[in-house]
């Protein structure tokens, strides 16, 4: 099982770096040739069958993960769950879903058309999580989604893939603070997401997070190609709840700002 799960993350990473070329540079800058331990990876979806959070939960649980936290993002109209694995070398998994019924009939209609063609039998394999888009939409439809939800627009362009990987600062040799990681990244020319401050969270909530602003990738829509924000890299430092026991959850107020890493500047 564990070998298959490690292979899943290798495949997911190879898919991710195709549209996030700066991720490899992050590894060079921070890892200096050593391997990097990831704290978590994040996926996005819609709360519509056959691709809702419940369906993705089954895939993730099939790899030995268990759910260990529920989150709500009222303003962005999202809910989320996080999953952990008994093997601590494996990243946690964070999955959010958009509450489609809370948007205009026009946006609901576009999203409904995107997902109706998906064969539910494909939404059982781990490889579904890096299967990309299963639909064709026009650039105007992308813009229509963007006007109401950056998240919906991002999903329409990229579909199922890792939205971000997250360096575990706790497991990163040579760095004891998130500030020092951020300083190194900025020195290397990266732009950090400053929504809500560069560092989201604090030791008081047992988790500090920061992230780069997303790379840009060329996406071929039905009628034209456009360069739009793709995926980003996140950095997380966790604090102990009790001696030897790091906090494993997520802080909704911080995650709310991290979502904005795929906004256009
Ligand atoms: Ni994250």
Image (cartoon, rainbow, N blue to C red):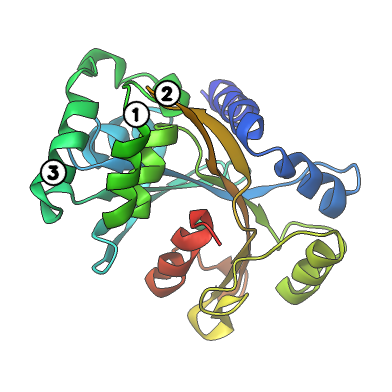
Residue 125 lies in quadrant: top left
User: SS of the residue at dot 2?
Assistant: helix
Q: Which residue is mark 1?
A: 59
Q: Residue at x 75, y 46 (%)?
A: 36
User: SS of the residue at dot 1?
Assistant: helix
Q: Nearer the viewer, residue 232 or 157?
A: 157
**Furthest-right residue in view?**
32
* Mark 1 vs 3, N-terminal side: 1
Whether ligand 1 has any atom under 8 Å from the Cβ at mark 2 is answered as no
Distance, label 1 to label 3, CA atoms, is 30 Å
Which dot marks residue 88?
none
Q: Position of residue 61 (x, y in %)?
A: 35, 34
* Mark 3 vs 2, N-terminal side: 3
In the displayed structure, does residue 66 sit left or right of residue 52?
right
CB contact under 8 Å: marks 3 and 2: no
CB contact under 8 Å: marks 1 and 3: no
Q: Position of residue 196 (x, y in %)?
A: 51, 78
Q: Which residue is mark 2?
A: 126
Q: Which residue is mark 3?
A: 106
Q: Quadrant of the C terminus?
A: bottom right
Q: Position of residue 96 (x, y in %)?
A: 33, 50
Residue 137 lies in quadrant: top left
Judged by depth in the image, the label closer to the viewer, 1 or 3, is 3
In the displayed structure, does residue 189 sit left or right of residue 32?
left
Judged by depth in the image, the label closer to the viewer, 3 or 2, is 3
CB contact under 8 Å: marks 1 and 2: yes
């Amino acid at each position: 099982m564990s070998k298959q799960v490690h292979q899943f993350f290798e495949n997911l990473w190879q898919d991710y770096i195709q549209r996030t070329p700066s991720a490899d540079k992050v590894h060079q800058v921070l890892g200096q040739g050593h391997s990097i331990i990831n704290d978590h990876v994040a996926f996005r979806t819609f709360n519509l069958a056959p691709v809702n959070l419940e369906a993705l939960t089954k895939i993730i649980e099939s790899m030995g993960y268990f759910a260990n936290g529920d989150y709500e993002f009222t303003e962005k109209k999202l809910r989320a769950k996080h999953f952990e694995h008994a093997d601590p070398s494996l990243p946690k998994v964070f999955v959010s879903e958009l509450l489609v019924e809370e948007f205009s009939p026009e946006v609901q209609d576009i999203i409904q058309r995107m997902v109706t063609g998906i064969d539910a039998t494909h939404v059982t394999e781990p490889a579904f999580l890096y299967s990309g888009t299963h639909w064709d939409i026009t650039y105007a439809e992308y813009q229509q989604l963007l006007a109401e939800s950056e998240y919906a627009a991002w999903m329409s362009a990229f579909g199922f893939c890792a939205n971000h990987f997250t360096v575990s600062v706790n497991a990163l040799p040579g760095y004891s603070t998130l500030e020092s990681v951020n300083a190194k990244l900025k020195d290397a020319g990266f732009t950090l997401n400053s929504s809500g401050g560069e560092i989201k969270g604090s030791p008081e909530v047992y988790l500090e997070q920061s992230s780069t602003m997303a790379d840009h990738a060329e996406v071929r829509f039905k009628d034209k190609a456009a360069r739009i924000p793709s995926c980003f890299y996140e950095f997380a430092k966790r604090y102990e709840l009790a001696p030897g026991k790091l906090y494993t959850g997520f802080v909704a107020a911080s995650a709310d700002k991290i979502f904005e890493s795929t906004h256009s500047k």
